Amino acid sequence: MSTTEEIAEMYGQYVMPTYAPEVAFVKGKGTKVWDADGKVYLDFVAGISVLNVGYSHPTVVGAIQDQAAELVHVSNLYYCENQAKLAKQLSDLSIKGKCFFSNSGAEANEGMIKLARLWGHEQGKYEIICMKNSFHGRTLATAAATGQEKVQKGFEPMPEGFVHADYNDIESVKALVNEKTVAIMLEAIQGEGGIIPADEQFMKDVRALCDEKDLLMLCDEVQCGLGRSGEWFGFQAYGVEPDAFSVAKALGSGYPIGAVVSGSKLADVFQPGNHASTFGGTPLACAAALATLEVMESEKLVERAKEKGDLFREGLSAFIDTYEHVTGVRGRGMMLGLELDQEAKPLVTALAEVGLLTIATAGNVVRFLPPLTVKDDELEEALDILDDCLAEMHGVVEEVEVAEVEEPEAAEVVEEVEAPEAAAEETPEESDVVA
Ligand SMILES: *Cc1c(COP(=O)(O)O)cnc(C)c1O
């Protein structure tokens, strides 16, 4: 197997530098990942909310292996039983309509945008009111829907038909409604925007405005959906139902799959020939998703996200009093952000060095998206590591103590380096009995 350095060298030569990776992971189990040099990390990024059931969950691994041996792909020209079953489950769990399957979040949002346009077509309605600071994907239409200039810059002209209101400001939304408006699209919790939940009144007002003006309410649940927020879907915390929503990231536990889920109003708008996807909802992708939903139900991960997320949030909130550069904690469930009064990158880098993976967002926010299966002692360990790194950042630890802080870390790494297989064998039983 190649070293990190060798892999980086090949990247430099052959992979377009759209990302700037520094570490290569070779194995994952539960909340832990091992890099190519044998170092172990606690992963509180989890693929940016992809690994909600943790790495290599035996139920998901088994379902993928069995289905791969049986039938990987059939064209959507033919029935696929797994697709029907998955559509039923997503529908039953949410807004009781129909699904269209895609391969990614952007493609799900693209489908949702097309669905809204087709619905409004005869009335000449096509414009979608999106939110500033939102994120909806990297295709041209979803980049146009995204309310961040950095996502659009250099790719102009952007497709038309998207305008942007201030999130959590219903008056700014109302000001944009006109005879061309077809929908309002938003995240219940802005993820890339910095872990910003919608205000309860705002979500209710958006729903009411849509009802009043005959507009569609569209939710992007790609990051906050599927248990992450402590509800199956983020909008459910507000007692409102969108007319359609998109999911992707966590749906297949890393096997690519996304979906547009509609309520009854939009269930039969797409007709044969309107929209399609070669790989959308294959037997294998749907098997991975069905197994993921099965794990979420059997291990009660939605409830767990709420319960353990509240505990973790409490731990994070304590840092506000202890450390002056920590200015806030936000988010819900296991989708949490620690707000700093400065750039978050240096802290994220320091945390990774001592074995805790997090991700910076919106400049000054450290984002935490651990697997929903994360164990109690792993949450505690993460808080300990954070405490150490925050102390170091604030210069409150004397040099001697810093050295001591690093030592057990190094020892743990060495211990795990030699036995990733052994560690892997322990974990399945543990993850079956998540409390
Ligand atoms: C990640 C993300 C997307 C894009 O998903 P891809 O699978 O990367 O295309 C869209 N919306 C939100 C809210 C996201 O977090």
Image: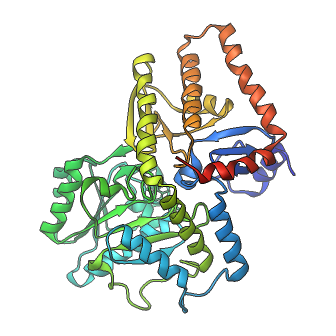
In this picture, is 84 found above or below 407?
below
Coloration mode: rainbow
Relative depth, front residue between 129 and 415? 415
Q: Which residue is painted at 40% across and 50% down in the image?
A: 230
In this picture, is 176 found above or below 26?
below
Q: Which residue is painted at 58% across and 21% down in the image?
A: 388
Q: Is residue 265 left or right of residue 93?
A: left
- Residue 112 sits in which quadrant? bottom left
Residue 393's spot in the image, x, y percent? 56, 19
Q: Which residue is painted at 46% across and 35% down in the image?
A: 312
Q: Is residue 256 left or right of residue 111?
A: right
Relative depth, front residue between 120 and 337? 337
Residue 283's spot in the image, x, y percent? 60, 79
In this picture, is 177 found above or below 393?
below
Q: Is residue 13 left or right of residue 248?
A: right
Residue 99's spot in the image, x, y percent? 41, 77
